[in-house]
Structures are given as C-alpha cells and as structure tokens.
Image (cartoon, grey):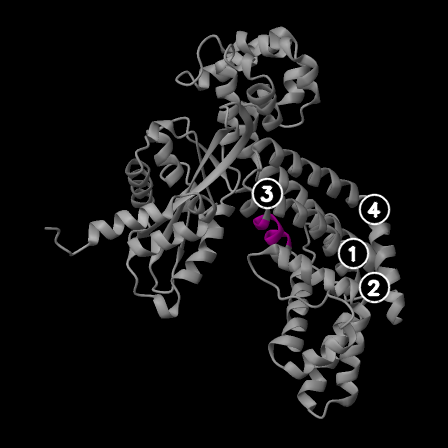
Amino acid sequence: MDTTQDISKVDQMSQIFRYVSVERDANRRACSITINEAFLGFHAIEDQSAAQIASNIVACIESKGLEISKCRGQGYDGAATMSGVYSGVQARIANMEKNALYVHCAAHNLNLIIQDAVSDIPEVSRFFDVVHNLYTFFFGESIRRWAVLSSFTSESSVTLKRLCPTRWSSRHDSLLALRFRFLDIMQALSKIILLSSKPKERDEAANLKKKIESFKFVLLVALQTKILNHVNAISKALQSKDMELSGAVKLIQNAVTALSSYRDHFEEAKETAVTLAEKWGIEIKFSNKRIKKVKCHFDELCMDERLSDPEERFKTTVFYRCLDMIINQLSDRFTGMNAVHHRFEIVQPAILASQSDDNLIAAASKLHEFYEEDLSPDFPGQLLSFRSALQEEVRSCSTVKDLAHLLLVENSALSSTVPDVCIALLLFLTLPVTVATAERSFSKLKLIKSYLRNTMSQQRLTGLALLSIENERARRLNIESIVDDFAEAKARRRHF
C-alpha cells in the first residue's frame, strides 16, 4: 500500500493484493506458478493518522470478501506512520493478525541508503550539486546551449540527464553520461566561453568548467559511477513483482560483497580517473587546502593531528567513508527483511538440500509453531519425505519458486501427499518485497485524473484505473455481454 495526492489535492490510497496462483491448462493440469500483484482501486484518505489508514485498509479487504485473518504479509515504505513499531499501521495490522509480517519496501530502503551517503559527506553533496547545475545550465535555462551540447553528442544516445531526488536510476544515468561524454561536455563549455556574447553566460560556463577540471571531481565521477552501477541494477531488479524475498536478500548480500571488495581497490578507481583526466589534459593532482587546527587546552596530553597529504585525506574522508556508510547501512537497514527470510530458511533450496535430518525436523517444527493455523503437525515429516523423494532435483533448484514449480507442476502427483509443503512454499512467495506496483499505479492516476478531468467521482476514477492497470485481465472479459447487460438495465423503453 502507498498513498499520493492527486491533482485535486485528495490523498489517494493505492492498495495491491499479492497472491500466488497455480495456472492450469485445458486438461486442468498444473503448468506454471504465477506471482500476482492485483490492483483493486484507489481509495480517498481524509485522515492520515495510522489508526485511520489501518481502518481503511481493513475495510477495503473486507469489502472484497476477504478476511484479515488470511493476511500473511504487509509492505509499506519507511514513514513513521506506516512502520511504527508500537502504533504504526503495520503494528495495528499485526495486532489483528500476528502472522501479517511487515517488510519494509526494499527499493525505498536502498534509495535511503544512497541518499544518506550523498547528504552526509560534504564533498559528495557538492559534487552532485555541480552535476545538477551542469544539466540546468545546458537544458533547464537555454535551448540554444542544449543545441551546442547536442552538436557534440549527436552521434550518441548518451547525453546529460536530469537528477531526480527520489529516482536514483536518474542519478546513475546522469553520471553515466558525464563519465562517457566528458570530453564533449568540456568542448561545449569551452565553445560557450569563447563565442557567447553574454557575460553572465560566459561566467557560468567558466565557473562550471573550473569545477569540472578538478582531478577530485573526476575521481568522484569514477567512484559514484561504480557505486551506482551496483545499486542501479539491484534497484531495478527489486521493483519486479516476480521478485521473491530470498532473491532480494541475495542481491543485497552480493552488493555488500562487491562494494567491500571495491573498498580495497582505491588505486583502481584512481587509474580510471587518471585515464579520464588525461583525455582533457587535467593535472593529476589533489588540491591542498589549509588544514583546520583545533585549539589545544592545557590538560590535553597530545596535539591535534590531521591528515596533511591531500590524497590520503580524500581516501579517508571521502572514499572510505562513502563506501563504509553504504556497506554498513546495507547490513543494518535490511535487518527486518533478513529476519523474515530467516524464519523461512528451511524452505530455501540450498538449506533444504544440505541440512541433516535432525536439523531439518527442528527447523520445520519451529516454522510450524509460527503458522499453526496454516501448517499441520505433520509438516516436518512431509518436508523430510519431500526431500528424500526428490533430493537431486532439490539441489538443482536456485529459488523457492523453482522449488514450488518442481513440486506443484513437475511432480503434481507427489504434491497431494505433502500438502503442508505446498502451503509453506506458496506462503513464502506471497510475502511482499517492494511497493513498486502501488507506485506504478500513481502514473496512471496522473494520466486519468488530469487538469481537464479533475472533477470525476471516486467510483469513476477507480473504474478507469482498474481498466487501465489491469488491462490484460479486462481484455479476457466478455465485454459485449457486459455492455448488453448494462444497456438492458438502463433502458427506458417499456415492453408491451
């Protein structure tokens, strides 16, 4: 669930129901496992308190003929109203159903990590200010200046991109353009400085050119591009509705490993920056600034010591600090998601195939204690039987979805003998990973309820949004029959 304001300043709540279905062919044989995220309409929110939002969520669930007791997962962003441990929406829903596990949206979490790494380091914050000013100078204020830049970049589709404060993929695209079109940008700035007839424009171009010609700026381009290369790929993968919790955990762990390895390769980042700087003839030297001194009091035993070498100072205060902040927060911020994943550890293919019989029974019994209403006491024995029957096939599976496909599709005859294993696998796949689907519905909201259609009723808005977002399901309906029923219901002719 997520909320946003429409053009009429009405807070609209988009609610997505995630469930897993077993698709069947014409002969009613299972053919695939599908993770579904269904949009069921927008709901106007007048009171943004946690109590009122939780009440609206429950009312929406019950209006669809569902029961809150069947809810096994809830996913929101990290706002205090939603994620509060004691009185947030997730806590209120959990009080109604203890097994409705809360998962903080992984994509939001990842963006917050990068945002902290940018805002808390002055050098990095100023670096992105320059990147933003560069785009504004060429595109935001003058079509003619953009034409000058385009004359150098016309042969390539890679060009300057706008920095978006919430979509970090835009920062990746912007840095990628700066990294690979660096010479073209410098040539465009030089041309404006030499040929422009406007003093203010020449001064702005000269100021930008002076900042970009610093070797520290070039090194930050190489560093931030490398970091965002890892983060951007993970962020896009996490926004898929087919992403399961185990896949998200694995991607985060891979990012920690890659960034930890990159931390020990400062010289590699420096070599990349040197190669880029030499193309424009930038001096390979760190600017040396005056070192701040702290007053020494009479009772102190040692003098204040600061790093005097500018390269070592950059390496310590920017390179290490930026990477350490991201690595530590990748571990800390995803603690909740890791805890939920750990609860279902025994149904992970790698763990299931490698555990001893005693450990498997103990872990399965623990999972049964959490879900006594869903899993019978026979679950540990059924899981052991399932592994014994398909041990080699289980080893070849990489995700829980593969495991579910193995049991429910490839060995459907066996699934009837281990029903609790089927339930456990589908239960894990039902857990939400991100709220990306809810946020994508906001794009349709802006298209439907526009400036020219801002007085439509809530019922009409929900109906049009349903037809647009769930268009694949709508096309499978018998529209002609529905229209005929509607026309007959609204007919004013009298039949004699």
Tag 3: residue type?
Leu
Task: Determine whether the residue tagged by mark 1 lies in a helix, strand or loop.
Answer: helix
Asked if the magenta segment contains residue 45, the reply would be no
- At a point 53% along the width and 33% down the height, the residue shown is 34
Query: Callout 4: helix, strand or loop?
Result: loop
Instruction: Please tell me whether mark 1 or mark 3 is closer to you in this view.
Output: 3
| Label 2–label 1 contact, CB within 8 A | yes
Give the residue at mark 2.
Answer: 286
Gap in angstroms between the C-alphas marked 1 and 3: 36 Å
- Observer-nearest residue: 270 or 141? 141
- The part of the chain drawn in magenta is 111-117
- Magenta: main secondary structure: helix
Task: Give the numbered dot on residue 313.
Answer: 1
Residue 114 colored in magenta in the image: yes
Q: Is residue 333 above or below residue 268?
A: above
Q: Picture coordinates of residue 290 (x, y %)?
A: 77, 67
Give the mark nearest the N terminus, 2 or 1. Answer: 2
Which quadrant: the N terminus?
Answer: top left
